[in-house]
Image (cartoon, rainbow, N blue to C red):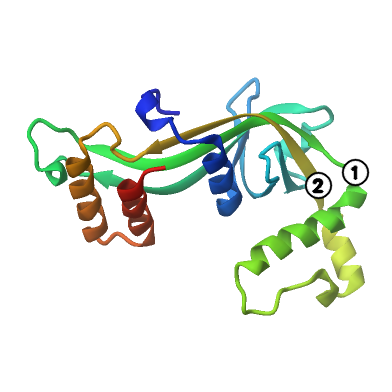
Amino acid sequence: MHPNPAFRQTPQERNIAFSREVGFGILAIGTEAAPLMSHIPFLLSEDGNTAEFHLVRSNPIARRMSNPLEARLAVSGPHSYVSPDWYEIDDQVPTWNYIAVHLVGEIERRPQENMRDLLNRQSAHFEDQLRPKPPWLTEKMTPEVLERMMRQIVPCQMRVHEIHGTWKLNQNKDEDVRLRAADKVEAAGMGAQTDLLARQMRTLP
């Protein structure tokens, strides 16, 4: 995470809300060689203390979870290159603005009989964001097919001990300079990511 304290003043409840809304991140564990990482959707409790997710049974991280493992779940938000010209002041350098939250804790496998409930809650959470589309339900599947597929995935949980958020939005610049940069980020037209980032640069967490 960025060491500048100016970018790390976001209230913890905002970091939790952001992570819950995104619901997707990179799970990483240390090994004797290179770290193992997996891209996963997850459910985060309202208090931020518990993240629930599932892994394919053959995933190398799942294979190592005979005991709880220390892990980090990195959640990324909007990001963009920021040109020095956009500040309209002298002696500036290029940078990259972004939002990221890291959840740190212990991960462990949960009993296999928890898989159906987790799948139902995960799908309900994300299907709800697609309304008015009628939600997909596990009941739509042939029971034998569903059972066979669920045997290939395992329910997991992270007990979150630490939450670290970096909201790098030019807080270290004067307000008028930051707002000019936000306008240029949006005007660069690099997609929904930059629109969201510009909005955050204007309002700050």
- The image shows residue 143 at horizontal and vertical percentages of 91, 71
Up the image or down, 63 lies above or below 200; here it is above
Up the image or down, 40 lies above or below 60; here it is below
Quadrant (top left/top right/bottom left/bottom right) for the C terminus:
top left
- The image shows residue 170 at horizontal and vertical percentages of 28, 38
> Measuring 45% from the left and 28% from the top, which residue is drawn there?
1
Residue at label 1? Answer: 111
Residue 88 lies in quadrant: top left
Up the image or down, 123 lies above or below 184; here it is below
Residue type at numbered disc 1:
Pro
Which secondary structure, mark 1? loop
Q: Nearer the viewer, residue 179 or 145?
A: 179
Residue type at numbered disc 2:
Pro
Residue 13 lies in quadrant: top right
Crowd class of label 1 (few under 14; some 14 to 19; many from 20; radius 10 Å): few
| Relative horizontal placement of residue 147, taking residue 80 as reference (left or right) | right
Q: Nearer the viewer, residue 44 or 191?
A: 44
- The image shows residue 15 at horizontal and vertical percentages of 53, 40
> Measuring 17% from the left and 33% from the top, which residue is drawn there?
93
Crowd class of label 2 (few under 14; some 14 to 19; many from 20; radius 10 Å): many
- The image shows residue 106 at horizontal and vertical percentages of 73, 29
| Relative horizontal placement of residue 67, taking residue 76 as reference (left or right) | right
The numbered dot on residue 6 is none
> Measuring 32% from the left and 47% from the top, which residue is drawn there?
201
> Measuring 85% from the left and 53% from the top, which residue is drawn there?
115
The numbered dot on residue 155 is 2
Q: CA distance from mark 1 to mark 2?
A: 7 Å
Which label's residue is closer to the chain start, 1 or 2?
A: 1
**Do residues under tags 1 and 2 come within 8 Å of each other at their CB atoms?**
yes
